Structures are given as structure tokens and as C-alpha cells.
Image (cartoon, rainbow, N blue to C red):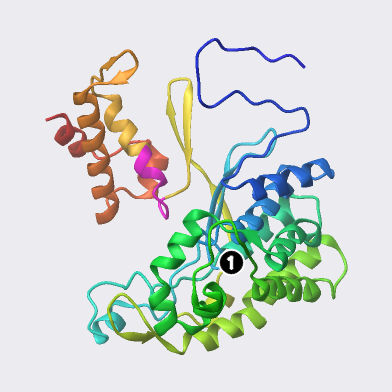
């Protein structure tokens, strides 16, 4: 194959591949995705494999209790959204937090936990668009969880910052993340065999049935209706220290997990001339960017040698503030963006001033 060369200097070189390419935030995730492609899998198989490896390789950024808001475009089809954001527990009401004497939901601890959406979302995507079995794509993550991953500087720093909280108030976290009483050092190997065993058990329950899709659905049920949901329900009934400075039990129950599952929806598409911006819906921050660009579309922006001027930076900042303000008060609903691709006229007038 031939690749056109650019004469402009760049610190991000042009990359090309003859058998597909995989990019992620960690080399182990990219390597796993590429291995799946080379083994005959498609892009969705590779994405799922990489996603699970990242739960092991970057535990300071994501994990099994995380979420998957994803945009994807099957060949020849319009972009779709994988809605893998779990909902708040049914008992997470304003009245409950009032009874606890809280005006804000603590950012740490059990009260802020939502239904973990990552497992169900990745498996739904694998079932409907992938070709590989669950064992084929999950095996890489299980291996890294069992044998260990090289600890990044950011992992070590993040664990060290909460080491006292773990040691004093979160004993199960201390057992996993403070081997010997200390945070793991950068470059050392750190294993998460509890996670590896959990995945192995999910696989074992999935493989009690035959058929690729049937096994994937069985694994989804084992999570949301089986032993994982039971473990989360039991653990959440205990009280642990959170940002409020007090100990609180959680609100997430097995019933919450059983009543939710990942789904698909249309993407929010906003056209700008020959280009289209594709984002997730109003349950994410996606429409905020569309609104910012719609605001800026009507303003005169200036650049010097491709660099935005101070006025342009100011306008972009104010547009962002207004768009997020709309999001916080709920005036910029998903329906607004789907029907008009725009924002309230008063917002545009405010930023123009």
C-alpha cells in the first residue's frame, strides 16, 4: 500500500495498517484488541476485548462497576449509541438524603453508586455486533488480572492519595490495593485475582448453555440476577466512610441491578456544513458540545496563523458556560437537539453580548 507523506512537522506521526488498527489509552488494551483482529474478529470483538483489559490496566480510570456510553457505526449504517450508563438506585430519593442530613450526594463511598453498566453494555455489543465468543474476548483481561499488570505512575499516585482512607475505613480496598500496607510502586506487577475469579465464574455459568448468543445472555443474567448482584446487595448494606465525614450504608440493591439493562438509541447528529457532529443523548454531556458549536456558529471568530485570538477563546469559554448552565437546569433537553439541532435563542443573544 502507498501512504502519502506530509511535510509538516508533527509530534503525532501518521499511522497506517494493513489489517486494521486499534487505539486505546493503554498499550495492553490496544494489544488485546489487535490480537482479536488478527485472530479473525471484527472491530466490535476487538473493542470489547480492549475494554475489559482497560478495566485491569487502568483501575484508576475505570472498572467493572463503570459505565459505557459509546458511539458506533456498523458498516453502511448510521451511527448508533450504546446506552451503558446505569441508573441511580430506586431508593436514592431527595427525601432519603434529606433524612440523612445531606445537601449533596457524597462523591465517594456507597451513596453515590449507580447500577454498574459496563458488563451488560459490553456484552450486549458483543452479542449483537461481534462474532467471537465471550471466552475469546474476555480471556485477555482474565490473564492480566490473574498474572498482574505493570503499575502506572498515576495508579500508584492515586492509591497513595487514598491509602489512609483505605487502611482506616475501607478494609477490602486496602486488602487489594495496599499489599503489605503500602501502595504498589510504579513499574511493579499488581494482580487482581478476585476480579479474575469473578470473570472466570461468570464464564463458567455462561458455558452451562450452548450457542454464542445464549452464552452471552447467560453471562448477563449471572451478573444482574445472579451471584454478582447478590454480592453487591450484601456489601451495600454495610456502612463505610464517605466525603461527608460519616459512615453511610449504600442504596444499591440486587433489585436495582435486575431492573436495568443496556440498550441502543439513535445518536444526536448535528450538521455543520459538510461535517456532522455525532454525540450521545441528553443523559450524557454530548448535546452540550452541539449547543456550544451552534452558539459559536453565529459569531465571528478570528485566528492568527491558525491560533485562536483572545476574543475567540473568550467566546468559546462563555459558550461552554452557557451550554452547561442549560444542561444543569434541564432546559436543553435531548428532544430539543433532535428536533432543531440548536439551543434556546436567548442563550445565543446572551453570549453575543
Q: Quadrant of residue 191?
A: bottom right
Q: In what quadrant of the picture does the C terminus appear?
A: top left
Residue 148 location in percent, x, y? 67, 64
Classify 303 as above or below 163.
above
Residue 213 visible in this rendered orientation of the protein: yes
Asked where in the image residue 297 lies, by quadrant, the reply is: top left
Query: Which is more toward the observer, 132 or 265?
Result: 132
Give percent across and percent down for residue 79: 58, 39
SS of the residue at dot 1?
A: loop
Residue 300 in percent (x, y) is at 23, 19
Label 1: how many residues lie within 10 Å, few (<14), some (14-19) or many (20+)? some
Compared to residue 279, the image places residue 238 above or below, namely below
Q: Is residue 139 above or below residue 286?
A: below
Taking the view exactly as shown, the residue that stands out farthest to the top is 7
Task: Name, please, the residue furthest toward the left.
Answer: 353
Q: Residue at x 23, y 49 (%)?
A: 325
Q: Position of residue 113 (x, y in %)?
A: 44, 73
- Looking at the rendering, the stretch of residues picked out in magenta corresponds to 282-289
Residue occupying image coordinates x 40% and y 70%? 162
Left or right, 323 with respect to 120, comes to left
**Does residue 110 appear anywhere in the picture?**
no
Residue that mark 1 sits on: 64
Q: Which residue is located at x 60 percent, y 44 percent?
A: 24
Farthest right residue in view: 210
Between 184 and 140, the one lying in front of the other is 184
Does the magenta run of residues contain 107? no
Which quadrant of the rendered structure holds the N terminus? top right
Q: Count of labels shown?
A: 1
Left or right placement of residue 317 versus residue 162 in this view: left
In the displayed structure image, the side of residue 226 where residue 300 appears, left or right:
left
Amino acid at each position: 500500500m502507498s501512504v502519502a507523506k506530509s511535510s509538516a512537522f508533527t509530534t503525532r506521526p501518521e499511522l497506517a495498517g494493513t489489517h486494521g488498527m486499534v487505539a486505546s489509552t493503554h498499550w495492553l488494551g490496544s494489544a488485546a484488541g489487535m490480537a482479536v483482529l488478527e485472530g479473525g474478529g471484527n472491530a466490535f470483538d476487538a473493542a470489547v476485548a480492549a475494554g475489559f483489559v482497560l478495566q485491569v490496566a487502568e483501575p484508576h480510570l475505570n472498572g467493572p462497576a463503570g459505565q459505557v456510553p459509546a458511539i458506533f457505526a456498523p458498516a453502511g449504517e448510521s451511527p448508533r449509541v450504546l446506552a451503558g450508563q446505569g441508573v441511580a438506585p430506586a431508593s436514592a430519593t431527595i427525601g432519603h438524603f434529606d433524612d440523612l442530613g445531606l445537601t449533596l450526594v457524597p462523591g465517594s463511598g456507597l451513596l453515590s453508586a449507580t447500577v454498574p453498566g459496563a458488563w451488560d453494555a459490553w456484552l450486549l455489543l458483543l452479542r449483537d455486533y461481534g462474532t467471537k465468543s465471550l471466552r475469546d474476548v474476555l480471556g485477555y483481561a482474565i490473564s492480566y488480572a490473574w498474572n498482574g499488570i505493570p503499575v502506572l505512575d498515576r495508579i500508584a499516585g492515586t492509591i497513595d492519595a487514598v491509602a489512609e482512607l483505605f487502611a482506616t475505613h475501607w478494609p477490602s480496598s486496602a486488602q487489594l490495593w495496599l499489599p503489605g500496607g503500602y501502595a504498589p510502586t510504579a513499574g511493579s506487577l499488581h494482580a487482581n485475582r478476585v476480579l479474575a475469579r469473578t470473570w472466570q465464574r461468570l464464564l463458567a455459568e455462561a458455558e452451562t448453555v450452548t450457542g454464542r448468543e445464549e452464552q452471552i445472555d447467560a453471562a448477563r443474567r449471572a451478573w444482574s440476577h445472579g451471584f454478582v448482584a447478590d454480592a453487591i446487595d450484601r456489601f451495600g448494606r454495610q456502612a463505610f466512610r464517605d466525603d461527608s465525614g460519616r459512615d453511610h450504608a449504600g442504596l444499591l440493591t440486587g433489585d436495582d441491578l435486575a431492573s436495568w439493562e443496556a440498550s441502543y438509541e439513535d445518536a444526536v447528529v448535528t450538521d455543520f456544513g459538510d461535517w456532522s457532529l455525532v454525540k450521545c443523548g441528553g443523559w450524557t454531556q454530548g448535546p452540550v458540545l452541539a449547543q456550544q458549536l451552534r452558539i459559536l456558529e453565529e459569531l465571528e471568530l478570528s485566528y492568527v496563523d491558525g491560533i485562536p485570538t483572545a476574543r475567540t477563546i473568550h467566546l468559546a469559554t462563555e459558550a461552554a458556560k452557557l451550554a452547561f448552565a442549560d444542561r444543569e437546569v434541564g432546559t436543553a433537553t435531548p428532544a430539543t437537539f433532535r428536533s432543531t439541532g440548536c439551543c434556546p435563542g436567548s442563550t445565543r443573544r446572551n453570549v453575543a453580548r
